[in-house]
């Protein structure tokens, strides 16, 4: 990856395995730099990323998950393309999902989502997380080794989100089966193919059924709270709108938290001194999670479309320009983070990272992801005396072999083979 101008970030497999030299090369030229293959303005600087994320009036989120693919339906011409965006945004893939909405529509629908993850509900949900983590660890630790992603992280996060939403116990295996697709499938940000217009249709249908049921017979669960919630103006959302909000939390939150857990356990297993620190000082775990999010953001980047001409980092951005705000690059900007390529579990400003975005689209599930990460790590450390990378799976320490998701949006391992020594007894 020495000739960064020749690299197609959206297609080259080398950029999947290790995107960071590419990010550094771009920032070395300019924190706001147009790439050569798809006419995307790449934002790699921290301050520049914050500026774009914080300005929803200038930068539309209509292309947030698609970027330059499949392209906007019509040419974007003129000094203000806002009317064209509103006229054609529904033709874009994922246009019915919250991350692609702009205010004021986004404001109203995000308000519905926040009914799902109130502080009280999160506290109640966290109490059950400890039991859910133990139940999954009972299965995972029994063999003494195994794939952490498939055998713990994915099923644990699925258990947590279905528990939070109140999905009936009898339906949970069905959800797990439907969502257990090979990681190489084409999807959001896939380098292998183009995504469908509505890839989450199955979830829409199932959550619509739950919402209709709760409106007929309210219960004491999160979906009931969402089903009976109203918009700020007092109007009742359509069933489809409510189902899509629930789908967004279920699908996006589950996938990204799996990557957070995988990245965290890779670091714990690779760096014995960090593992020892966390075992001895459990209060370090929250900051450790923030540093994991900074160092290996589960979301590499997010797209925006400029409505009008703008200037970011001293660079002129014409109206109609697609920008990719690279969280993974901004989180390693040396202007904001000292020695950014070094993992520091005690870093004072680790929480400044942009892994959850910034501005009106800041990830609403961030508190849930942090809680899942803390609970999972604490219980794994409680129930093991040592955690190691499996050399049979990933090779020796000086020649590791890891595979990452083939996507330009997500950053995470497809598998993580671990070996562990059980703790004496069983901590509670």
Image: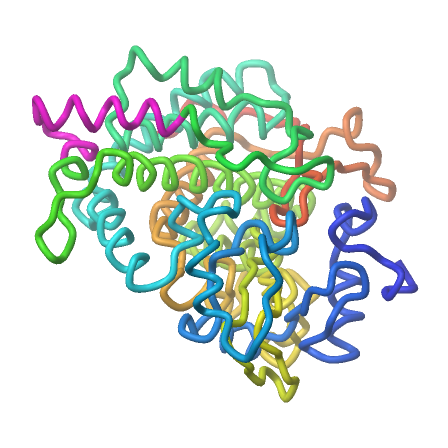
Residue at 54 percent of width and 52 percent of height: 277
Q: Quadrant of residue 26?
A: bottom right
Magenta span includes 221: yes
Q: Is residue 342 above or below residue 145?
A: below
Q: Quadrant of residue 283?
A: bottom left
Residue at 53 percent of width and 37 percent of height: 197
Q: Position of residue 325 (x, y in %)?
A: 59, 65
Magenta span includes 364: no
Magenta span dominant secondary structure:
helix
Q: Is residue 134 above or below residue 316?
A: above
Is 28 displayed left or right of 90 in the figure?
A: right
Q: Position of residue 236 (x, y in %)?
A: 13, 43
Read off the magenta span. 203-224
Asked whether residue 132 is in view, the answer is yes
Instruction: Pick out the residue farthest to the top.
Output: 170
Q: Position of residue 184 (x, y in %)?
A: 69, 30
Is 26 displayed left or right of 254 in the figure?
A: right
Is 109 displayed left or right of 138 in the figure?
A: left
Residue at 33 percent of width and 22 percent of height: 206
Q: Is residue 266 above or below residue 415?
A: below
Asked whether residue 415 is in view, the answer is no
């Amino acid at each position: 990856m020495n000739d960064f101008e020749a690299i197609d970030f959206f297609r080259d497999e080398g950029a999947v395995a290790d995107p960071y030299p590419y990010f550094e090369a771009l920032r070395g030229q300019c924190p706001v730099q147009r790439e050569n293959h798809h006419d995307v303005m790449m934002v790699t600087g921290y301050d520049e990323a914050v500026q774009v994320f914080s300005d929803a009036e200038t930068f539309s989120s209509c292309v947030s998950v698609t970027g330059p693919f499949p392209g906007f339906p019509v040419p974007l011409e003129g000094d203000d393309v806002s009317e064209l965006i509103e006229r054609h945004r529904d033709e874009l893939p994922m246009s019915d999902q919250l991350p692609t909405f702009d205010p004021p529509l986004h404001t109203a629908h995000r308000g519905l989502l926040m009914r799902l993850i109130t502080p009280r509900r999160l506290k109640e949900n966290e109490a059950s997380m400890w039991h859910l983590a133990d139940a999954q660890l009972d299965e995972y630790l029994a063999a003494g080794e195994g794939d952490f992603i498939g055998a713990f992280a994915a099923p644990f996060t699925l258990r947590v989100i279905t528990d939070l939403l109140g999905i009936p116990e009898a339906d949970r295996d069905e959800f797990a089966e439907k969502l257990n697709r090979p990681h190489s499938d084409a999807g959001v940000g896939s380098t292998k193919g183009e995504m469908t217009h509505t890839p989450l249709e199955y979830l829409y249908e199932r959550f619509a059924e739950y919402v209709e049921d709760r409106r007929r017979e309210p219960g004491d669960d999160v979906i009931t709270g969402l089903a009976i919630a109203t918009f700020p103006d007092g109007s009742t959302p359509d069933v489809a709108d409510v189902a899509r909000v629930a789908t967004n939390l279920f699908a996006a939150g589950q996938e990204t938290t799996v990557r957070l857990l995988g990245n965290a356990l890779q670091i714990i297993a690779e760096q014995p001194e960090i593992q020892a620190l966390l075992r001895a000082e459990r209060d370090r775990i929250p900051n450790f999670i923030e540093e994991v999010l900074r160092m290996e953001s589960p979301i590499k980047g997010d797209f925006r479309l400029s409505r009008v001409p703008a200037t970011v980092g001293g660079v002129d951005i014409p109206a109609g320009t697609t920008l990719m705000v690279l969280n993974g690059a901004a989180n390693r900007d040396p202007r904001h983070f000292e020695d950014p390529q070094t993992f520091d579990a005690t870093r004072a400003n680790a929480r400044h990272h942009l892994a959850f975005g910034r501005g009106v689209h800041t990830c609403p599930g961030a508190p849930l992801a942090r809680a899942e990460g803390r609970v999972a790590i604490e219980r794994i450390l409680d129930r093991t005396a040592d955690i190691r990378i499996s050399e049979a799976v990933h090779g020796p320490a000086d020649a590791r072999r890891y595979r990452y998701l083939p996507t330009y949006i997500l950053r995470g391992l497809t598998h993580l083979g671990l070996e562990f020594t059980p703790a004496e007894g069983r901590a509670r």
